[in-house]
Image (cartoon, grey):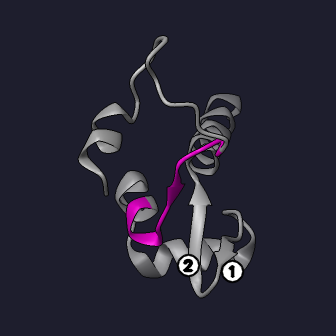
Amino acid sequence: MNRKFASKIGTEGANAPSCPIPALLLTDHECIAALGCARSTFWKWVQEGKFPRPAKLGGMSRWPATDIEAFIAQATAARDAA
């Protein structure tokens, strides 16, 4: 990745790059690390429909970071409702 571009990722203000992509796309390994679960558990959740199916880009599976946020928010809401 271009170091000039990489150094600006996540910055705000007038000098921040304009990006048409609405959310960062994550790999299964990044989703697993964020959720703190086993790889087999993560893919079981995807298969059962508990976690959204990935967007396929060529042969790659990717999830918007917002899917992780929504999944955690839903689990928190279910916990609080119980």
- The answer to whether residue 27 is magenta is yes
Residue furthest toward the right?
49
* Along the viewing direction, whichever of 10 and 52 lies nearer the viewer: 10
Name the mark on residue 57: none
Mark 1: secondary structure:
helix
Q: Position of residue 58 (x, y in %)?
A: 63, 84
Callout 2 touching callout 1 (CB < 8 Å):
yes
- In the picture, measured across the screen, residue 59 lies left or right of residue 32, that is right
Compared to residue 65, the image places residue 50 above or below, namely below
Q: CA distance from mark 2 to mark 1?
A: 6 Å
Q: Quadrant of residue 39?
A: bottom left
Residue furthest toward the bottom?
59
Name the mark on residue 47: 1
Compared to residue 26, the image places residue 74 above or below, namely above
Amino acid at the residue labelled 1: Gln
Amino acid at the residue labelled 2: Trp
Mark 2: secondary structure:
helix
Name the mark on residue 43: 2
Residue appearing at x 71%, y 30% in the figure: 81
Residue appearing at x 47%, y 67% in the figure: 27
Q: Position of residue 18 (x, y in %)?
A: 57, 31
- In the picture, measured across the screen, residue 15 lies left or right of residue 61, that is left
